[in-house]
Amino acid sequence: MAHLTPTPALEPGQDKTMILNMGPQHPSTHGVLRLLLEIDGETVVRMMPDIGFLHTGIEKTCEAKFYHQVVPLTDRIDYLCPMTNNLCYALAVEKLLGLEIPPKAQWLRVMLNELTRINSHLVWLGTHAMDIGAMTVFLYCFREREDVLRLFEAVSGQRMMTSYFRIGGVALEPPLDFFDRVRKFADAFPSKVDEYEGLLTGNPIWVMRTKGVATISAEDALALGASGPTLRGSGVDFDLRRDMPYSGYENFKFKVPVRQDGDVFARYMCRVAELRESIGIVKQALDGMPSGPVKANAPKVVLPDREKMKTEMEALIYHFKIVTEGFAVPEGEVYQAVESPRGEMGYYVVSDGSAKPYRVHMRSACLANMQTLPKMCEGRLLADVVAAIGSIDIVLGEIDR
Amino acid sequence: MLHLILFSVFGLVCVAGAVNLLLQRHPINSALSLVVVMGSLAVEFLLLGAEFVAAIQVIVYAGAVMVLFVFVIMLLNAGVEEQTSGSRVAWLLGIPAVLAGMVIVCWALLERSDAGRAAIGALPGHPADIAQLLFHQFLLPFEVTSILVLIAIMGAVVLAARPESVERTKKEG
Amino acid sequence: MNITTFIIVSVIKTALVLFVLLTAVAYTVWLERKVVGHMQNRWGPTRVGPFGLLQPAADGVKFLFKEDLTPPHVFKPLYIAAPMIAVIFAVTSIAVIPFGNWLNVGNFHTPFQITDVNIGLLVVLGITSLGVYGVALSGWSSNSKYSLLGGLRASAQMVSYEIALGLSLVGVLILAGTFSLRGIVEAQAGHFWGFIPNWFIFRGGQIVAFFIYLTAAYAETNRIPFDLPEAETELVAGYHTEYSAMKFAMFFMAEYANMITVACLASLLFLGGWGGPLFGPSWLQQLLPLVWFVLRVFVFLFIYIWVRGTLPRFRYDQLMAFGWKFLLPLAIANLMVTAIVVVLK
Amino acid sequence: MALAPAVTDIEQLKGHPAVARVAGWNPRAVEGVKFDRDEMTIYVERSAIRQASALLRDDPTCPFNYLSDITCVDWHPSEPRFEVIYHLLSIPNKERVRLKVKLSGETPALDSITSVWPGANYFEREIFDLFGIRFNGHPYLRRILMPENWEGHPLRKDYPVEGYR
């Protein structure tokens, strides 16, 4: 697989080619990604992604926080799917603690996680379509995303940085009419997906721009560490939700869309199909939502209810202790991966037995997915670079952390 | 009267553009001077009544041929040319030759000035007249020219084709 | 008409047409923002004036007062000249476009047109073909890679599509038998079969020519789905990446003025120009053709905007293949069929 | 909070395909094993990592054909100071394994596994950037997140969080 190892830095000044510095400020690098392109006319000869412009040192920051204080940091890694990151971190720490989560919390997590996936995919679809020039889809997608964000706001008080999943459950009971609102959204949403597909899937220009463009084979995708729709678009049938279930995903029925072609169109079709599957999971979660508490019964870890705090001495003491000195986590290490909208999002948490994590490492799906980019783009046209970037759905916050 | 003034003005613009074309050191300036020459020539044609020729002049020369020139200059990113004093032979022979040529042209023009002189704006420039000339009177030369141009195009394609694509064509038969 | 009145009338007409054209340019921008906005579940401009009608004025003021940056390393003379070239050629072609019939006030007769030349169509084509210089030179003189790529794309695209555009019009010319735009409109007067207007779009298979014209015109004016020279997601802003303030506004004006020219041509050549029902007093009968003409232009512009709201963008090689391998042969075929039909008749 | 104690006896864990494979190749390559919280960890000898990962990738019965992640932990001030951690995943068998390599704090270096998994490229660069560990044989070992001229390696435990004084 030597052909996949990257070429060294680009040296300018060669005869026929020109170095184009795409980014870090460029309309279609989805944040602050810099691509060094060596182009011959408009054909990309070589490509070097350059990242790190959004590096904020979250992994280092985590080491100075209590375990429960890390949760808001995880939102900020991937600002398009905060709940997925919350979930992954919470699951990792719960695994370290050996904590059992009540079923209602699990189902709520699944439901919100799928809504997050819809949110993220909508942003992806909109920006991807915009990159290829279809402007209207962008605004249609953001219309529905707005609905999802309102649901997030209703349940967590925040539109984007939700921090709703906590270690040992979720922060609060959802508001009274929340499930009705989710159901209303879930009923309306499939027709909206039809609308996007009507504008894109059958459109000859869209098909011309995406079919057979930026292809990558299953072997290359696996070797480069691609995951999620980027991998499934190449024909590898693997989804952590189905194959290594977590948080009660084994209770839900859903299909994992797989396409064989490995091109931009295949990845597009995978994600659009995932939109429909996700809304199916949301409906299943609504139908089978169990009753009971939304937090684990672990007073040393989980903050007590406000009500109890005001009436019970012990609850007040626990609250005080958790907030001021955190809670100790038994020594050990855990790698927890979830299927984020972009692929395998993994948290590797190491505990030395104290109240602060010794090391938190986030396995970024985008970082690995982005390694496929040169393979996809080299030898293709400049316009295909834009399509390829859109099709692997990168979030620079997650890549740079 | 107005026509005559305009005719003279654009004639001067045309000559100035041509001189500028020679004097400019930067290829893009030269190319643009040539566009000016083409444009003012078109105006001259128009004033003479040859509207069709004028329009074709602009569309073909200024709008297409010169755009390709500019294109090439842009692609090659040609820079300013270096100034050389030129060879002595050119100085010795060129200037007298140019002068002699000008004298001959002027003499010829003056000699034939009475015969076939057309009033400004009275040339048969209507598309129908041109078509009459091209497709009736001069049909054979016209067709021969087009065949010549076709051969030239084929030659250009062969010369410009990359070796690998020629190889491929050979293989494919 | 003596020379003094000729000059006075010409100056007045030119000023009037220029004023109307520039206003129309400004309001086409407004229309686009409004229509696309409504297509996309939003309002478009609403703040400045009723329905945002004063937005173009606000934009103009903004462009005027913005800092006019000239980046270092540009080739200054051409960098400054390029937007002017673009806007001048975009505006000039309006000179030969007729908007309506004759204006008769007492003894004074003048057409609704700056000047009527018998090769009007060729003049329009010639001038628009020069517009490519503005784009190409701005791309080159900016000394920026994005601009250069945009300039190259634009000039290649415009030169290629010009051929298809020109050929699509030849069918109409054969049917009309004249280059004069006024003559072409007059050839479309009346009805056939009693009710179908005698427009060229309905006659002799010229609907194919209309389609070719429409497509090529989108490419000529660099509009979606052919807006590759300024494809902002690939080339930032293409050939006008390095421009700001009024220089940028000039490119903007040129684009919309070209749109309007192209729309005018389409109405004149295919949609019967200013033909339409005339009624009422004689002053109304003189002005109604203007209304019908503007209506057609408006419809054409609306289609432009509608397409922009719907379609994604081509890729460069696809655009070239589409132009050379599909549009051009189609245009030639249409031309030959038309010629044969006319000869056989 | 019932946590089963970690199992560290290699004989008990021989049943795990990854352990069997690596230990079967070269018993000395396995420095130790740990099974904790349902996760399998193999401590691999420093020089054997490239070979071990290639072996696991090409395992006929349980191919660990996907490299999930590479990361590092700094146990400053104890020695060996660094642990480089590889997370492998077997997509057909839905099985994970963690390889660990211990490195001393002097001049930490080990073999790059980019020749086995091209996808290791960015992960190794990130570790080089943030921990200062060299990967021999890496095609392009340059800083990836921090600026080229950055001083120090931020994720080391002795990195001055409030700046050098």
Image (cartoon, coloured by chain):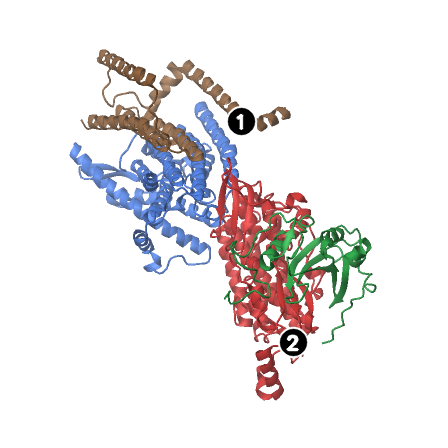
Chain colours: A red, B brown, C blue, D green
Label 2 neighbourhood size at 10 Å, few (<14), some (14-19), many (20+)? Answer: some
Q: Is the residue D12 above or below the residue C5 in the image?
A: below
- Residue nearest the viewer, comparing C289 with C179: C179
Asked if the residues shown at circle 2 and circle 1 are in contact, with their CB atoms under 8 angstroms apart, the answer is: no
> Which chain's residue wears label 2?
A
Percent coordinates x, y for residue D75 in the rendering:
65, 66
Does the image show residue A286? no
> Which chain's residue wears label 1?
B
Lateral position of residue C94 relative to residue D28, left or right:
left
Residue, disc 1: B161
Residue type indicated by callout 2: Ala
- Residue nearest the viewer, comparing A227 with A154: A227
Callout 1 secondary element? loop
Percent coordinates x, y for residue C236 in the rendering:
45, 48
Residue, disc 2: A328
Q: Is the residue C94 above or below the residue A291 in the image?
A: above
Marks 2 and 1 sit apart, C-alpha to C-alpha, by 74 Å
Q: Is the residue D50 above or below the residue B168 in the image?
A: below
Percent coordinates x, y for residue A189 in the rendering:
57, 61
Q: Is the residue A95 above or below the residue D51 in the image?
A: below
- For the point 44% across and 38% down, the residue is C152
